[in-house]
Structure formats: structure tokens, C-alpha cells
Amino acid sequence: MKKSLLLLGFIVLATLTVKAQSVEDLMSQVINSNLQTTVAELSGEQATSINGSTQTITTRVQSNNDLAAGYIKERLEAMPNLNVEFQNFNSVGKNVIATQLGQTNPDDIYIICAHYDSVTTYCADDNATGVAAILEIARLLSTQCIDNTIVYALWDEEEIGLRGANYYAQQAADETNGNTRDNILGVINMDMIGYDSDAPGAPGDNQFDIDVRDIANSIAIKDDLINLLNTYTFDLHEIVVNPGTTASDHSRFWNQGYSAVLVGESWETNDQTPDYHTSNDRVEDIDFQYMTELTKLVLAYTATKASLIGVDNTITQTTTSLTSNQATGTYQWYNCDTNTPIFGETNQSFTPLTSGNYAVEATNGSCTEMSVCINFSVLSTEEFQPNEIKVYPNPVNSVIKVDNFTASKIDITINNISGKVIKKINSRKAHIEIEFDSTASGVYFVNVKSKTKASTFKIIKE
């Protein structure tokens, strides 16, 4: 991996309320239904949106899996703080690589990975499950500031010789022509993590394999995983396989002297999917609760090794306001529905005047984190009567006039048709004039609110 690691700006697209500051908080936010949806979409059992249109991934066979690669890349690009790219390694093979740069030690790298290609149609367990886990972990960790770099890698052409991972590992280890060997400190490969012979979701042994060999610090990764199993609550039982299999992508990192392990369902106890490498490998056979537990485990390892930096990106919501839980620093509130900053809203607390989805970017020192979007509903209030508030003229050319006959303070917010705040005023004056001459032509909404009443007026700027 001889390339610059770039820290991208955020993209505010998340729509789930996540409280995620400790490793345990993050684990609690792994969502089973997210995993189910992603596996169904990748296996072609459910249509999905790709490049703005509804499409079905009918195959992930390496000779015809560009649609799957595009789906994965688009999902990762919708997450904050990731630099996402295709890594082309032959005329058709392409890895999807997403890099989240460490703030303190950007050259210290941890990789979590899975292959996305398949041998035939469907192949839900092999390996839509591993890819879904990586995407779910990236969804949660991409919102966090971290000390060390995380690489989320989705390999191509695993099924025909581990080619994608092999290329990446060789490039990372290359020290010729002035190149420097990448400082990869740990690799966890997730390959087939969805089958447990107990009935899906039912109590059972929930055994899984950790395939390891005494290469570099691979044994230490195994020990770290077991320590996490003993530190947090998991419904899992590990089977350590040493020497572990070389028949998956982690082995290509062993070949280059890097630390790596494989995490997956228990082949060691003959508890792997009976439909391996056939088109009968379907979503209906996946034990998603078991898969969720394995996803949590790898997330816990990655979050621990990446080392979370202490910026609180959570929000406290009341009936009237939103407040960043980061006690010190600077703030910027965002309208998630338009992906735009809200003009003038830079305080720790924010009182939305209209219902919608909102997030805050909190900065403390050199670390900036974006919260996820919070759905906020403005409490229903009585509307103003015509003899209380008057907004005119309509259409307007240069000045919006607001007559306030209530003798009380009113808040006036003007939004464009996309929801972006154009102007914001509060006043007790009976006659208020708002300069609008420099505003572009179009449709605008004037939101007027007092402590007890609120109304919205649609106006046209000519």
C-alpha cells in the first residue's frame, strides 16, 4: 500500500441514533437488521439502490462483480472520515479499500477485511456475511476520532487464488525502489461468519474458529480476542486452531511476515454451512444473532486497537432543544436533510424551529467528530391568527415585512426550498423589515414562532 493516507471530510448521511463513546457503547449499537439487509442485498435476494437506481446484484463471481464492488464503495463513501478507493490489481480484479486515518499515529495500521467475490449465485454465507460485518463496523467506527489508522478492506478474486489480498500484502511489504514497508500491526479476516448448526437465533454452542499461526504477533491477536470475550458479554465460544488454515486472505499477510488471524464459523468442529460453494447458500440459513456476536467481537478488537480519542459526539435531546454532550470545544449544527451547516448555530445547544434531522460537529483540540443525525419534532403549537402576524409582500422583491401585533418576542427563520437557513432574526418590534434584495429568486418559507404559537408563510422571491 504505497500511497498517501488522506483524511476526508465528513458526509452526514447516518440516520440512526447512536451513543458511542466507549467500546461497550459501540458494541451495543451493532444492528442485527442492518446485517440482514446487507447480506440480502449483496446475495441478490433483495434489490437495492446503486448509483441512484434500484438494481439487483445477481452475481458476485469475479468475472462479473462490478455492481457488487460499486455497491460496497458507495456504502463506504456515505460514511464520514473515510478515504475510499478501488485498488485495481489486474485487468478486472479490484479491491475496495477504505482508510480512516489515525490522528496520533497515522502510520500504525490495523486492517479488518473480507472478500466480496463468490463462486456462483447467492453465496450469502460465503462471503456476504463477512462484507456486511465490515460495513457495519465501519458505520460505527467512522464517526470516531482514533489514534491509529484503520483500513477496511474488501478483497476481490479470493475464490480464484486469494489474488486481491495477495496483491495488497505484497505492495504493503515492498521495500524496493525506496519504498517503506507499511507498519501493519494486525489483520483480522472475516470469512463465512453466519452459519451455526443450531436453529438460527436459538441457544446453542455458538462456537467459532480463530485460525492462527505463530507468525509475527499473530498469537497476540488471538489472545486479545479471547481477553475481549472475557471482558465483555458475548454469546460465543472460541475454538483456537493452530496451525490455522491458509485457505483464506489472512494467509497472504502471513506470507509477508504480518500479524493476522481468521475469524469465522467453526470448520474445526465440522459446523460450517453444508451449502458451501453452491447456489443453495441462501439468507434463510444464516444465524444472524450468531453473526451479530462475531461482528461485535471484531468491532471491539478494532476499536480497542485503534484507540478512541475522547470527544463526546453524542447528543442529549429534550422536547425543545438538542445539546452536544461535549462539554468544551467548538460546535457547528447541521441540517441532515440538506447536508448543510445551519448558519449561526455554533453554540453547545440548539433549538430547532422546524421538524427535521439534525447533527452536531464537535471539535476539541485537533479532534473533530460528527454526531449521527437526530430526528427532532417541533411540538405542535397553535398558529397565529391573521390579526396577530402579517408577512408581506408576496411576491417579494427586496424587503420582507413582518408586522407583529402580539406585543411579544418572536423568532423568525427563513429557509430556502431545500431547508437551508437563509436568515434568522428575533425581535419584539411591531414592524420588522428583512433585507432580501441579495437573495436568489425562488420559493422561501418564513417561520415565525413565539413561546405559544408558530406559523409558516410561503413566499416567492422574484
Image (cartoon, rainbow, N blue to C red):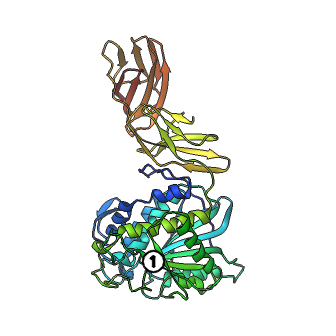
Which quadrant is the N terminus positioned in? bottom right
Which quadrant is the C terminus positioned in? top left
Give residue 427's position: percent from left, percent from top.
49, 18
Looking at the image, residue 56 sits to the left or right of residue 337; the answer is: left
Query: Is residue 444 visible in this depiction of the protein?
Result: yes
Query: Is residue 438 visible in this depiction of the protein?
Result: no
Location of residue 242 by image quarter: bottom right
Q: How many labels does the image show?
A: 1
Q: Is residue 131 above or below residue 439?
A: below
Give residue 290's position: percent from left, percent from top.
39, 70
Q: Residues within 10 Å of mark 1 (few under 14, many from 20)?
A: many
Looking at the image, residue 118 sits to the left or right of residue 241; the answer is: left
Amino acid type of the residue that numbered disc 1 sits on in the rendered structure: Phe
103 and 448: which one is in front? 103
125 and 417: which one is in front? 125
Give residue 74's position: percent from left, percent from top.
43, 63
Residue at the extreme right of the image, as rendered: 178
7 and 302: which one is in front? 302
Residue at image point 46% right, 22% down? 434
Location of residue 197 by image quarter: bottom left
Residue at image point 55% right, 68% down? 230
Find disc 1 in the rendering and name its residue. Answer: 208
Q: Is residue 455 above or below residue 3?
A: above
Residue at image point 48% right, 88% down? 247
Dot 1: what SS?
A: strand
Give residue 209's position: percent from left, percent from top.
47, 80
